[in-house]
Image (cartoon, grey):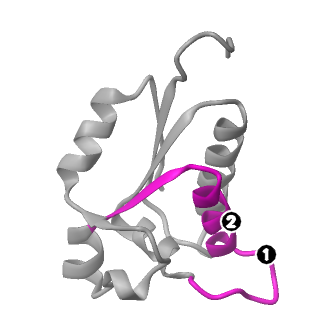
Amino acid sequence: MDQGSDPKTLTIVLNRGPFISEYADMAVNLALRARKKGYNVNLYLYLDGVWVAHVRRDKDFANVGEHLRSAMRRGVNVKSCARCADEARDITEDDQIEGIPLVGIYTLIDWLKESDKVVTFTG
């Protein structure tokens, strides 16, 4: 990206949970690479993707929760679908990584409208 231009925005929609496929890792790695290239990055955790924010503690192996916290420290904006988390899966904000709010689907719609690119990880 040109240094003088406004940064582009990438929104990533993650519909898959951790440890069932590599989609969660791929989504977070894409978010980190896009941030490194200067993009504004939104990551919306939807459907089973809300389980990614549930991996709060460090593990004895590299894990998506650790990578997600790293992405957030680097400026990736992460939000979880409230209906998918709290209402459907009994995951509250206290159950997930600190700093990831539960929001409505309209947040995703706003992000999609503001984005230059959208990538979904579903399966």
72 to the left or right of 3? left
114 to the left or right of 106? right
Q: Is residue 23 above or below residue 65?
A: above
> Which quarter of the picture shows residue 5?
top right
Q: Which of the marked residues, 1 or 2, is nearer the chain's N terminus?
A: 1
- Give the alpha-carbon distance from disc 1 to disc 2, as whole Å: 8 Å
Mark 1 surroundings within 10 Å by alpha-carbon count, few (fewer than 14), some (14 through 19), many (20 or more): few
Q: Is residue 121 above or below residue 20?
A: above
> Which quarter of the picture shows residue 35?
top right
State the extent of the magenta-drawn residues as a range.
56-81
53 magenta-colored: no
Mark 2 surroundings within 10 Å by alpha-carbon count, few (fewer than 14), some (14 through 19), many (20 or more): some
Q: Disc 2 residue type?
A: His
Q: Is the N terminus in the top left, top right, bottom left or bottom right quadrant?
A: top right
Q: Is residue 108 above or below residue 25?
A: above
The residue where tag 1 is placed is 62
66 magenta-colored: yes
Find out whether the residues at labels 1 and 2 contact each other: C-beta distance under 8 Å.
yes
Name the residue at 42% across, 68% down: 100
Name the residue at 27% across, 88% down: 90
Q: Disc 1 residue type?
A: Ala
x, y (%) of residue 18?
A: 57, 73
Which of 55 and 2 lies nearest the eye of the viewer?
2
- For residue 67, which numbered disc appears in the image? 2
Which of 54 and 49 lies nearest the eye of the viewer?
54
Element marked by disc 2: helix
x, y (%) of residue 17?
A: 50, 70
Q: Is residue 102 above or below residue 58?
A: above
Element marked by disc 1: loop
